[in-house]
Image (tube, rainbow, N blue to C red):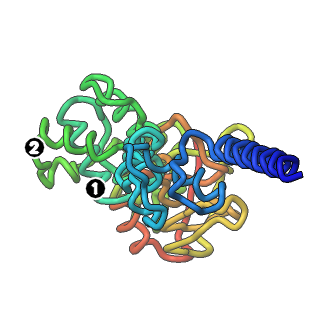
Amino acid sequence: MSKVRNRGRRRVSVTVAAAGAALAMAVLAACGPQDTGADQKPAAATTTAATTAPATGDAAPTTAPPTTDPATTPPATTTPSAAPTTTKPARPPVEQAVMKVGSNSSQVRELQARLGQLHLFSQNPTGYYGTVTQHAVSDFQERHGLTSTGSVSQATWSRLRSLTHQPTHKELYPPIPAKPAGKLDARCMTGRALCISKTTRTLSWVVDGKVQATMDVRFGSQYTPTREGLFHVNSKSRDHVSTIYHTAMPFAMFFSGGQAVHYSSDFAARGYAGASHGCVNVRDKAAISKLFDEVRVGDKVVVYW
């Protein structure tokens, strides 16, 4: 009986030993090769530790803060700046025009005088930037390797000034030779009269048969002709603006409805390439300014061929 009991005990011991060995093998298989058995933290924690620190043969303490691992905390300088590769190069600024078509100033008069020194502007300076000035500027730009815009940029102005001298007063305000009045109409020979000839395209200011001044004039087109006949100045307006065409009519002296003798910046700039809407245009601003002061309401206006 005692032998049977001993055999039973041996069998139980063998069975328990075998079960213990199997359990130990199962535990080792679950931990994996990265675990040394010293770390008793859950599997998730040990996996994180393994991926953040290489094995050195010694168990790495799992209490080390993650910021000590250079692989998980890249320095700020590792992020390259995108500005050099993503930012488009800035375009050069467009140079603004110093003077352009429509400008009216003493600087434009100087521009015209300087262009005249280079034989690019053949008319007398007027101070008004019209198409004639525009073409002269374009010609200058083409001759000197500048962008031909017809407008005066700072580069164009600097180049022009370097090639010319400061205009004299005579160059800026050249005397306008008086044209012969031609044959005056008989109606102009008495009293005070604005004697306007369509044949010679001149206006003569005549007092008691004597010519006081003569200036160039321009008339209306075939669709808006300047009326002919004997009229009288019925009103004057120094700074008049047309209520129909909304254009300036300085030194206007009205003689027939809306038709008047007045200064025209367009005539000064374009000459006879254009026409009025029926008025008598004068291009010499200084001359008509003086005439405006002398003419009185009621003076005669004679328009004839």
Q: Amino acid at mark 2?
A: His
The secondary element bearing badge 1 is classed as helix
CA gap, disc 2 and disc 1: 14 Å
In the foreground, 244 or 216: 244
Label 1, residues with CA under 10 Å away: few <14, some 14-19, many ≥20: some
In the foreground, 162 or 275: 162
Query: Does 198 appear above or below 249?
Result: above
Q: Amino acid at mark 1?
A: Gln
Q: Residue at x 37, y 44 (%)?
A: 56
- Judge whether residue 185 can be spotted in this image: no
Determine which residue is flagged by label 1: 107
Query: Does 41 appear above or below 109?
Result: below
Residue 154 percent coordinates (x, y): 28, 47
* Left or right side of 184 for 298: right
Q: Which mark is residue 272?
A: none
Residue 242 percent coordinates (x, y): 65, 65
* Left or right side of 218 for 207: left
Q: Residue at x 66, y 40 (%)?
A: 221
- Judge whether residue 249 can be spotted in this image: yes
Label 2, residues with CA under 10 Å away: few <14, some 14-19, many ≥20: few
Q: Residue at x 54, y 67 (%)?
A: 252
Residue 68 percent coordinates (x, y): 38, 60
In the foreground, 76 or 91: 76
Q: Residue at x 29, y 52 (%)?
A: 109
Quadrant position of the C terminus in the picture: top right
Residue 138 percent coordinates (x, y): 37, 31
Instruction: Tell me which label, 2 or 1, sits earlier in the chain.
Output: 1
The secondary element bearing badge 2 is classed as loop
Q: Which mark is residue 165?
A: 2
* Left or right side of 37 for 3: right
